[in-house]
Amino acid sequence: MKKIILILITVIGTVSCGSTDFVKTSDVPWSTIELRDNLSYDRAWNEAIDVIAARFEMDMISKDGGYARTGWTYTWNTKGNYTKNYRNRVILKFSPDRTKIQVKTDAQSGTPGKWKNGFDSRLLVTIKQDIMGVVGRTVR
């Protein structure tokens, strides 16, 4: 009986944390966004940061280095409700020539001290689309 209850708790916890979007990997991929022509670095930087900061607390920002990272959030896949067994964050970096932005989403599932590393596929698609909408090159 204890095993059945433990399995149910595990399954309910997995579903509620949105783990179907969690991809377990030790090598989190970067996704590239090509910037529109004639878009200044300052404008692209500000727009990209505005998109991310609207949903996340910024943890590290280096405009000169073209790098930004959010803090961990525990509410992305829970419709605003805190969960202690799933967290994610967004990282972006500009290419050295400032014509592209690379973005990735780190995610961890588990418990403190026993985290499984990976990324959140839905968050990656959402953030990439949002950033592309304000600074991305249009397809003809």
Image (cartoon, rainbow, N blue to C red):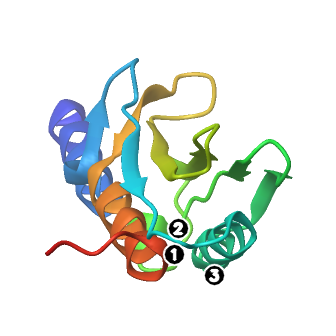
Q: Which residue is mark 3?
A: 54
Say if mark 1 contacts mark 2, CB within 8 Å. yes
Direction from residue 94 to residue 27 in the image, left or right: left
Q: Secondary structure at mark 3?
A: loop
Q: How far, Cα to Cα, is label 1 from label 3?
A: 17 Å
Earlier sequence position, callout 1 versus callout 2 = 2
Quarter of image, res 58? bottom right
Measure the alpha-carbon separation of dots 3 and 2.
Answer: 14 Å
Query: Mark 3 against mark 2, which lies toward the viewer?
Result: 3
Circle 3: residue type:
Ala
Categorize mark 2 by other alpha carbons within 10 Å: few (<14), some (14-19), many (20+): some
Q: Position of residue 28 (x, y in %)?
A: 40, 29
Amino acid type of the residue tagged 2 in the rendering: Thr
**Residues under labels 1 and 2: Cα distance?**
5 Å
In which quadrant is the C terminus drawn?
Answer: bottom left
Q: Between disc 1 and disc 3, whose residue precedes? A: 3
Instruction: Identify the residue position indicated by label 2 in the image.
Output: 75
Residue 139, given in percent of the width and then of the height, sits at 19, 72
| Residue type, mark 1 in image | Asn
Element under disc 2: loop
Q: Residue 34: x and y, percent?
A: 40, 56
